Amino acid sequence: MAKDYYKILGVSRDATKEEIRKAYRRLAKLYHPDLNKGDKEKEEKFKEINEAYSVLSDDKLRQQYDQFGTTENNGFQGGAGGFGFKDFDFDFDDIFGSFSDLFGFGQRQNRKRVVRGDDIYKDLTISLKEAALGTEKELKVKFSEKCPHCQGTGAEEFETCPTCNGSGYIRKTRRTPFGIFTTTTTCPKCNGSGKIIKKKCPVCNGKGYIQKEKTIKLTIPSGAEEGDALRIPGAGNLADIPGDLYVIIHVKDDKTFYRKGDNLYYNLKLSIPEAVLGCRKKIPLIDGSSKTLRIKSGVQPGEELVIRHAGVRNSKTGHTGDLIVKVEVEIPKRLTREQRKLFEELKHTFSS
Ligand SMILES: [Zn+2]
Ligand SMILES: [Zn+2]
């Protein structure tokens, strides 16, 4: 049987989110492993508290738990394994606030950070023909790269940080309910580098990066659909590691054809005599050519005639769709005197 998460947190079943959060805060501090080193029982309890909070603080999971007494069939990993410190870290600052650096969680090592350039997102609109058959495109992309003048630092000249005297960190002694603690935190003024900008780089105006533009050659695979994203690795903003470029495909509506999956549709308008007697009709194809169809006499409105493999060449599936020709029969709204006479005569032949 599943655990009673309300009981674990010591709250009623109708507790508000705020009450749940408060209860969790109080218990998490009490059972935190750093305060109870080696105490297996308290560590287990701590995991239980986290598990309970993960469920009850999430509206969807809480509702499911209330209803079924479990969250198991939601892909939710119950038990100690599912609630490691990874989940916990996520909320750490929110829950503990300044409490965190008390235990050294807030101390970040002054290791060199590798900076990855941001990804760039670009929209590209193509025609239905280009989507169906694939195409090559050139795309102008604005991107940023490290300023060559200041090597990305944004500075022409540095000076020693006055806040930390160049050490990059600040020591603080604090009295807390658990005793006196000395904590070391990264200097907020210089972010741990020990120096600050004295004179801004004139080339990038202190930003550390400059804007450039490049032309990217793109191959749009046939079968592309509205909303498809093409990823071009390394074509994003430049930094230690370049970001990626994502091109979001938009497909314009076509005047002649419309698309459903890999099939293309074409509405064929026939006059009443053409539908009744049969005819030959030239059907346009997406590649610009055409094909002549023989329409048999007595074709019905809404009937679908299929031209095999004249649809979308889907390079993802290797499948080529069909062109579906949908028959429409036009009923004339106005008749000439002669037509009216002929229809009147025709009418008699149909009366039973
Ligand atoms: Zn610069
Ligand atoms: Zn500093």
Image: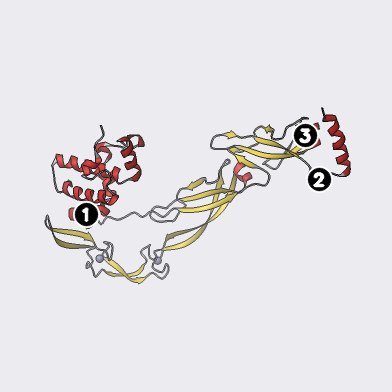
Task: Tell me which numbered mark, 1 or 3, is placed earlier along the sequence.
Answer: 1
Q: Is residue 84 visible?
A: no
Q: Position of residue 48 (x, y in %)?
A: 22, 41
Left or right: residue 91 versus residue 174 is: right
Quarter of the image where one finds residue 303: top right
Residue pictured at 35% horizontal, 68% vertical: 155
Label 3 sits on a secondary structure element that is helix
Residue highlighted by disc 1: 100
**What's the distance in space between the residues labelled 3 and 2, CA to CA?**
18 Å
**What's the distance in space between the residues labelled 1 and 3, CA to CA?**
80 Å
Q: Nearer the viewer, mark 3 or mark 2?
A: 2
Residue highlighted by disc 3: 275
Report the colour scheme.
secondary structure
> Residue 214 or 71: which is nearer the viewer?
71
Residue highlighted by disc 2: 334
Q: Pick the quarter of the image with the C terminus.
A: top right
Task: Tell me which numbered mark, 1 or 2, is placed earlier along the sequence.
Answer: 1
